[in-house]
Structure formats: C-alpha cells, structure tokens
Image: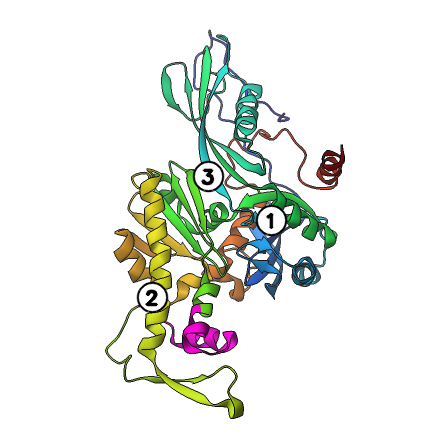
C-alpha cells in the first residue's frame, strides 16, 4: 500500500481529481545485469536530486555458458557474470547485493486476459486494482510456466470503456484487460541459481524487449504505435507498443550467432574467422562489385594455413537468407496475433545484430514499414562503448530499476516477495513436500 494514497473527492465536492502521486525515486546505488548469449553487461546507477539517472559503474564480458537466452553451463555463466559485475562494482566503488535482470530465458510468451472484478457500487480503490492484477496472475498460471509480468492495459467501469486509472470512480463491476508475460519455471530457477552463485539476489526480472523499447522508443512512438525488434546474439525478440503500453512480445531463437555459424559452415572456416568476415564484409544487400572482390578464407583442418579465395557475393548470399527468415517470422507474428494495426507504421531495430549494413533496408522492404535504428537515450556517465544498439537492453534495465516505465507507479501491484532467499526457501519446500 502506498504511503500517500490518492485522495478521492466525495460526491458533493467539485473539481478535478488529484493526480496520483509519482513513485518516489529510489535512493542509493542500484545495479542491473543484461545476460545475453554473446555478452554480459552490468550497469550501476543512482538517481540524482533532479530526478535524472547517472551511471556510476559499467562492466562488460563476453557471454559464456548461455545459449539462446538460457543458461547451459552454470560454471561458465557464473564466471562471466561475476567478472562483469566485479568490473562495474570496482568502477562505482560499491558492492551489490541484488540486481535487476533481463528476461530472455525460458521461451517467454505473451498472452491477454480479461478479468471482471466485483466492486458493488462503491469507489474503486487501490486494493481493487491489486486484486484484479493478482486474479489475472492466478488465471494465467500454467503448469511448468511462471508469470513474470501482469500488466494492466485498460479498464472499463460498468459500461464506460477506455479508463486509464479507475481509482475513485464508482461502479458495480470493474473490467480489466491484462497483458501477461510468462516463462518456463525450470529456466527461471536455473537463472536464479546462477545469480545466487554470484552472491546476488534477483531484485526484479524484466522482459528484454520491454526495456529495450523503454530505452530506444521516443514517447510519440510508444503512444501512436511502434514495434521494437531487439536483434541479439542468440535471440531476436520483439515488442509492440501502443497507447503508452506494451501490447505484445515474442521471441525467436535466432540471432547474430546463427549468422556467424551459417558462414562458418558455408565457407568451411572457423567460427572466429566467420565472425571477422561478418563484421568486416557482411551485408544483406548485393552490390555490383561483390563478384569481383575476393576475400581470403582460412579452411578448417588445412595445414600451412591454406587460404581459399571466395567472392564477397558468397558471404552476402549466406547472410541474407537468415535475416530474411527473421523478418518473415516477425511479419507472420504481427499478422497472426492481430497486432499489425496496433503496431502502427513504425519499426525500431536495436541490438548488436541490427548493425549489419542493409538490415534496415531489408526490414523496411519485408515489413512494409518505416524503419530506424534505435540507440539508448543519453545517460550521464554512460561510457561511449555502451551507447550503441547492443546495449539498449542494459540501459533500459537501468531506467526500469530507477522507476521508469511502470504502470501505476504510486502503488505496489505485486503480492509476493521478489525473487531471493525467501523464494528459494519456498521453492525448496515445494519440491520436497
């Protein structure tokens, strides 16, 4: 319950209702960890007296022990996360006990629910809002999956629709449209176990495309409708924003690593050299000179470092199908879920894999939408290295941990403790009783 609840005007008093008090900015330093297949990034920030966010520490490590967002090697993942967090802690001169972590494991899924909540003719209260959210959480529970976000999209009080904040309004029945994002419970436990081995608790778990949109979309895009496509190393995730809400999310187990692997197989070379070819010469759009430009490629298993000469067009022809597959999936998902109209005419690409030349033009052509590249908004103290699209999720996590992007910021919609020692104890008992 909020310390300063919203004042409700009695029926005899006139005047507009008071706006809900804003969530008080947190004090002291706080940390976030973006766990990806190709990199792990940690940011430590602090809210300044003027309400702005300042970065105090930054750490970055190559991703290890993680495949398509899931933990596959606890020891390797622990070492990468420990080293990354340690770098940020040393830079900020603080020690973290808990961190906010991105959700990309466990095949996250997005579902919509309608909930009717009896009010009985009185004014809607904060407890009613909380009750609606918890009812949606209970209804969304599926064996083997755990809800991570239960987000109110809109409300209706009796026959009045499109109510953003129903508190203080009188009605018989409160109707709510809820967006639920859930994930495989076993993958979540593996993630929690990995973070616990780093002597940390998970303070909050947040959808990756949601925070990527928080850091890269401008307010008008979130209001009028836009699709954020976060192209990472092991996964590509998308989120549809409209009416300042996240309406839908989806994740595809395809990313930049798969492009690299396609090159390594197609050219019979090492993964390291395939990554170098992709970085230096990769493109998804053909040019007239591609057939004439020959690239040296060391062959796997050949002695004396024997090199083959392949035309650049061969590299382009290997890369293009994988990116076309990705955007075909995004288009099919938008059409099949009925989100194409809500998504508007705007697409924002972010993540490290979107930086290949020609990706923006391919996305615009295949999705029939306006496309731009998204970088995280300016943060004071953020190193130049972390200002590119690859760090959009980390920057969004820090903004979320600072209090941005949450619905009903002045009340706590959760009815449970954050993931940590208590949750681990409960899970231990559930497994054995």
Relative to 401, say whether 41 is above or below.
below
**Residue position for label 2:** 320
Q: Nearer the viewer, residue 39 or 70?
A: 70
Label 1 with label 3: CB-CB less than 8 Å: no
**Residue position for label 3:** 110
Q: Is residue 304 left or right of residue 424?
A: left
The residue most toward the left is: 288
Q: Which of label 2 and label 1 is nearer to you? A: 2
Please identify the dominant SS of the magenta region.
helix
Q: Earlier in the sequence, mark 2 or mark 1?
A: 1
Image quadrant where residue 156 sits: top left
Crowdedness near tag 3: few (<14), some (14–19) or many (≥20) residues, C-alpha within 10 Å: some
* Residue 50 in sight in this render: no
Q: Quadrant of the N terminus?
A: top right
Q: Is residue 190 left or right of residue 170?
A: right
Q: Quadrant of the C terminus?
A: top right
The residue at 47%/48% (across/down) is 209
Q: Is residue 303 left or right of residue 246?
A: right
Secondary structure beneath dot 1 equals strand
Q: Earlier in the sequence, mark 2 or mark 3?
A: 3
> Range of the magenta residues?
262-284
Secondary structure beneath dot 2 equals helix
Give x and y (percent) for residue 2: 62, 26
């Amino acid at each position: 319950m909020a310390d300063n609840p919203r004042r409700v005007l009695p029926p005899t008093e006139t005047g507009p209702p008071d706006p809900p008090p804003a969530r008080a900015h947190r004090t002291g330093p706080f940390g976030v960890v973006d766990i990806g297949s190709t990199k792990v990034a940690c940011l430590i920030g602090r809210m300044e007296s003027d309400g702005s966010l300042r970065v105090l520490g930054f750490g970055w490590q190559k991703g290890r022990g993680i495949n398509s967002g899931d933990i596959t090697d606890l020891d390797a993942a622990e070492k990468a996360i420990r080293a990354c967090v340690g770098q940020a802690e040393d830079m900020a001169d603080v020690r973290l006990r808990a961190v906010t972590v991105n959700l990309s494991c466990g095949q996250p899924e997005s579902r919509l629910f309608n909930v009717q909540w009896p009010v009985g003719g009185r004014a809607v209260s904060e407890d009613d809002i909380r009750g609606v959210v918890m009812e949606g959480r209970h209804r969304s529970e599926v064996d083997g999956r755990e809800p991570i976000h239960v987000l109110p999209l809109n409300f209706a009080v009796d026959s009045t629709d499109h109510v953003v904040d129903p508190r203080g309004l009188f009605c018989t029945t409160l109707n709510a449209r809820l967006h639920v994002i859930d994930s495989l419970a076993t993958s979540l436990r593996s993630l929690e176990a990995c973070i616990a081995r780093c002597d940390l608790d998970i303070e909050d778990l947040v959808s990756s495309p949601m925070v990527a949109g928080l850091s890269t979309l401008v307010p008008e895009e979130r209001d009028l409708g836009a699709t954020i496509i976060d192209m990472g190393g092991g996964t590509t995730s998308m989120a549809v924003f409209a009416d300042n809400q996240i309406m839908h999310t989806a994740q595809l187990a395809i990313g930049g690593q798969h492009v690299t692997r396609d090159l390594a197989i197609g050219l019979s070379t090492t993964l390291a050299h395939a990554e170098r070819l992709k970085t230096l010469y990769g493109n998804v759009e053909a040019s007239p000179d591609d057939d004439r430009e020959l690239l040296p490629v060391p062959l796997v298993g050949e002695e004396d470092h024997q090199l083959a000469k392949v035309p650049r067009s061969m590299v382009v022809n290997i890369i293009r199908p994988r990116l076309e597959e990705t955007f075909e999936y995004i288009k099919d998902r938008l059409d099949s879920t009925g989100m194409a109209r809500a998504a508007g005419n705007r697409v924002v690409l972010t993540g490290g894999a979107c930086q290949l030349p020609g990706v923006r033009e391919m996305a615009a052509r295949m999705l029939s939408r306006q496309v731009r590249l998204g970088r995280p908004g300016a943060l004071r103290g953020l190193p130049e290295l972390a200002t590119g699209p690859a760090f959009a999720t980390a920057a969004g996590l820090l903004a979320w941990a600072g209090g941005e992007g949450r619905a009903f910021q002045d009340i706590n919609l959760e009815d449970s403790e954050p993931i940590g020692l208590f949750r681990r104890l409960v899970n231990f008992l559930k497994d054995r009783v």
